[in-house]
Amino acid sequence: MALDRSDVEKIAHLARLAVTPADCDRYAHDLSNILSLVARMDAVDTTGVEPMAHPLHMTQRLRPDLPTESDQRDRFQAIAPQTDAGLYLVPKVIE
């Protein structure tokens, strides 16, 4: 799919981007190349290929889920303007 100057101007308008007229032709060429690459990749037969989340067979190293700070809820709620049953009370903002 080849894009022309008017296509780039329309895309720029919809995306609220300021594109100078001098750059429109270059952007049209670059975007056309990208769309051509996507079309070539879409044409590849991928039947029988298992989808992968990552190209490498690795597992992420996770740190132990341990608390790093002490529980200070009572201290924080003591200085809050209003609390009830462990919850912070705030003014209603949506009617």
Image (tube, grey):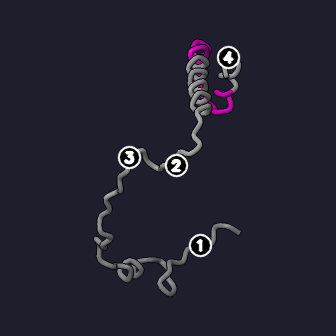
Gap in Å between the C-alphas at discs 3 and 2?
13 Å
* Residue 46 to residue 50: above or below: above
Q: Which of pointers 3 and 1 lies earlier in the amino acid sequence?
A: 3
Q: Does the segment drawn in magenta span residue 82?
A: no
Instruction: Identify the amino acid type marked 2.
Output: Glu
Instruction: Identify the amino acid type marked 4.
Output: Asp
**Image marks 3 and 1: residues in contact by CB distance under 8 Å:** no
* Residue 56 to residue 94: above or below: above
Residue that label 1 marks: 91
Q: Quadrant of residue 71?
A: bottom left
Label 2: how many Cα within 10 Å (few below 14, some 14–19, many 20+): few
Q: Tell which tag, 4 or 3, sits nearer the viewer.
A: 3
Q: Position of residue 17 (x, y in %)?
A: 60, 29
Label 4: how many Cα within 10 Å (few below 14, some 14–19, many 20+): some
Image quarter hosting the N terminus: top right
Q: Which of pointers 1 and 4 lies earlier in the amino acid sequence?
A: 4
**Image marks 4 and 2: residues in contact by CB distance under 8 Å:** no
Residue that label 4 marks: 4
Q: Tell which tag, 1 or 4, sits nearer the viewer.
A: 4
Q: Which of pointers 2 and 1 lies earlier in the amino acid sequence?
A: 2
